[in-house]
Image (spheres, helix red, strand yellow):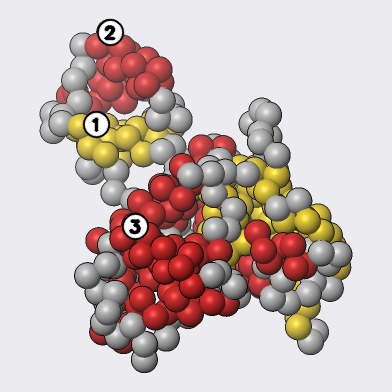
Amino acid sequence: MPSSVMPTSMQSGPRPPAAIHAAGLRKSYGGRTVLDGVDLDIPAGSVFALLGPNGAGKTTTVKILSTLIAADGGQARVAGHDLVGDPRAVRSAIGVTGQFSAVDGLITGEENMLLMADLHHLPKREGRRVTAGLLERFGLTEAAKKPASTYSGGMKRRLDIAMTLVGDPRIIFLDEPTTGLDPRSRHTMWQIVRELVTGGVTVFLTTQYLEEADELADRIAVLHDGRIAAQGTAGELKRLVSGGHVRLRFTDPAAYREAASELREAVRDDEALALRIPGDGSQRALRALLGRLDSAGVEADELTVHTPDLDDVFFALTGGADVPHQPEETVR
């Protein structure tokens, strides 16, 4: 792993009060350490994404913070309440949507919702009002009287989240909520998350989809070997990884040689008549590069810009040998 990819936390100015604060969380199963001193500070009204390989401890972190299991060490406050000292207050402030659906397929969507209302001890009239409102909000009114077993994967996931919202939680844990969903259903879920945050809800999201974290999260943490390898905004994390560059390709060998002579820092590919110039992909750097080519009277036939993405960050931080790149943006 590159030595430059080592910071565990990056500050980007004043932030709102923490909805979740954890310090030194530890958890072991048998002789295996799953969490080894995890620190988190998640502002209220934001989306926080926890990334990590399978078995990294993402679900364990969610279970600890939602009072489902106890940590072996460390401290945490959720919604201002101590996790160990006042777990009931923590549970009253949160909602949890796990990896696997909590929907009962033998009863209707509406009955699932009303059952959740009963578990929250809502009066019957209030329970029916809340149920009708959430079913409408999540586009499930027409299917409300149908058995949940007939719902598509995306509909079940929407019902899952609707059930989570019955208690009006201010913090919601979504543990890999879009796993197995088709792209359309995934985008629908993204919109639901954005609407929740607009309403002031804090969302703690675990995901294996890097695009999902990039799209939704205000802050991202990468969990590896039981520790937070790095955390910050998507932009901050991307700046940890080197490898940004501009690729110029030519069809005229003479133009290629002139450009190579002007851009001596470029990595040459004589067979492809291409040059690779290190850079951060910023508008300023690109303008400077094109200015140098104009001054030399050289014009490239193809220009491609690549900046590090979360794939690069993830593999660098978790020790991946090969870093898959997204398709580059090409300007012709």
- Name the amino acid, label 3: Arg
For disc 3, the marked residue is 137
Q: Are marks 1 and 2 in contact (CB under 8 Å)?
A: no
First in residue order: circle 3 vs circle 1: 3
Residue 332: percent from left, percent from top: 15, 31
Residue 63: percent from left, percent from top: 66, 72
- Name the amino acid, label 2: Ser
Is the residue 305 above or below the residue 327 in the image? above
- The label nearer to you, 3 versus 1, is 3
Identify which residue is drawn at 44% across, 29% down: 279
3D distance between C-alphas at marks 1 and 2? 17 Å
Between 290 and 330, the one lying in front of the other is: 330
Q: Are marks 2 and 3 in contact (CB under 8 Å)?
A: no
Between 11 and 303, the one lying in front of the other is: 11
For disc 2, the marked residue is 295
- Mark count: 3
Q: Dot 2, crowdedness within 10 Å: few (<14), some or many (≥20)?
A: few
Identify which residue is drawn at 46% across, 42% down: 198
Q: Is 143 left, or right, of 229 in this rendering?
A: left
| Residue 189 visible (yes or no) | no
For disc 1, the marked residue is 303
Between 66 and 138, the one lying in front of the other is: 138
Q: Is 74 left, or right, of 6 in this rendering?
A: right
